[in-house]
Image: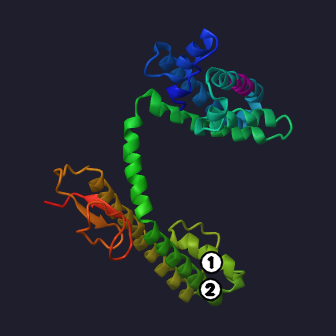
Amino acid sequence: MTPASNRAQNGPEWRGRLFDIIFETDTHRGARAFDLVLIVIILASVIVVMLDSVETIAASHHQLLYVLEWIFTVLFTIEYAARLASVQSKRRYALSFFGIIDLLAIIPTYLSLLLPGSEYLAIIRVLRVLRVFRVLKLVRYLGEARILARAMAASRYRIIVFLITVVTMVVVLGSFMYLIEGEDAGFTSIPAAVYWAVVTLTTVGFGDITPNTAVGQFLASVIMLMGYGMIAVPTGIVSVELAYAAHAAGQTGGAPGTRDNVCTACRTGGHDSDARFCKKCGGTVIAIAPEG
């Protein structure tokens, strides 16, 4: 989203009007209609790309889908050019998140002229639907996303330790299964056995490799049960950090002046009001409202 500060100050009057229509959803009457129509076109173009990948549909309607794809691409190209023409700093828009997405939305179709099949990369256009946050005034919910991001960041070390533990387990268990079952059961190598252990531990169970011996089946059963138990570990880690992050953001309605500075790593409290790092372990300190 390009801020109003990128509005062209000099130049023809049409440029300012074009900027208002394209970027000023909250202040220009026609801008909201423009964004809504744009989102509909984006969704329609994504549906066309998806349908063209279905063999039975493509066989009977390929020509229609091909024409529609080029129509959408031309419309997006015109829109991208209009965005560049209306802003004061073209470089700033072109290198912004939405500027890059807008460009990537039109490249695949043109690229397909040289590399057949690359037109399916146009599915990236679905990212442009993120503009709906601005159109439907959902930007206020981005604060909730920031709380979730803080919780994920605070729990990253515990999650890393958890993942290292899981990786170690699947390597050991996969190696055991390779020794128990051998190549006759499909465990042709330790990497193949580790792959089976990952699939089994995550409770996916493709069934492409299965143990035949009683010992192997017993070990597989243990791994499956461990997989169900391990689902709760990362969930619990993130849930705790999410609660702390919500407290820090004032989500629990704590009264002003009653917050305590608590370390996110060791949970030690009582830090100075301006403390950023824990005096005990060096972890990040956040302010939370005490319970009760």
In the displayed structure, does residue 145 sit left or right of residue 185? left
Residue at the farthest left position? 292
- Principal secondary structure, stretch drawn in magenta: helix
Q: Nearer the viewer, residue 96 or 62?
A: 96
Q: Would you call the spot at circle 1 few (<14 residues within 10 Å), some (14-19), or many (20 or more)?
A: many
- State yes or no: discs 2 and 1 in contact (Cβ < 8 Å): yes
Q: Nearer the viewer, residue 133 or 198?
A: 133
Q: Nearer the viewer, residue 77 or 41?
A: 77
Q: Earlier in the sequence, mark 2 or mark 1?
A: 2
Residue at the farthest right position? 114
Can residue 55 be spotted in the picture?
no
Q: Which residue is mark 2?
A: 175
Q: Residue 221 in the image: x percent, y percent?
A: 48, 79
Figure check: 176 above or below 31: below
Q: Nearer the viewer, residue 196 or 5?
A: 5
Residue for point 49% across, 71% down: 160
Question: Looking at the rendering, which quadrant does residue 200 occupy?
Answer: bottom right
Which region shows up in magenta?
Answer: 69-77
Q: Residue 56 in the image: x percent, y percent?
A: 72, 37
In the displayed structure, does residue 65 sit left or right of residue 29? right
Question: Looking at the rendering, which quadrant does residue 284 occupy?
Answer: bottom left
Q: Which residue is mark 1?
A: 194
Residue type at the position of mark 1: Val
Q: Secondary structure at mark 2?
A: helix
Q: Secondary structure at mark 1?
A: helix
Q: Residue 108 in the image: x percent, y percent?
A: 75, 37
Residue for point 72% across, 80% down: 188
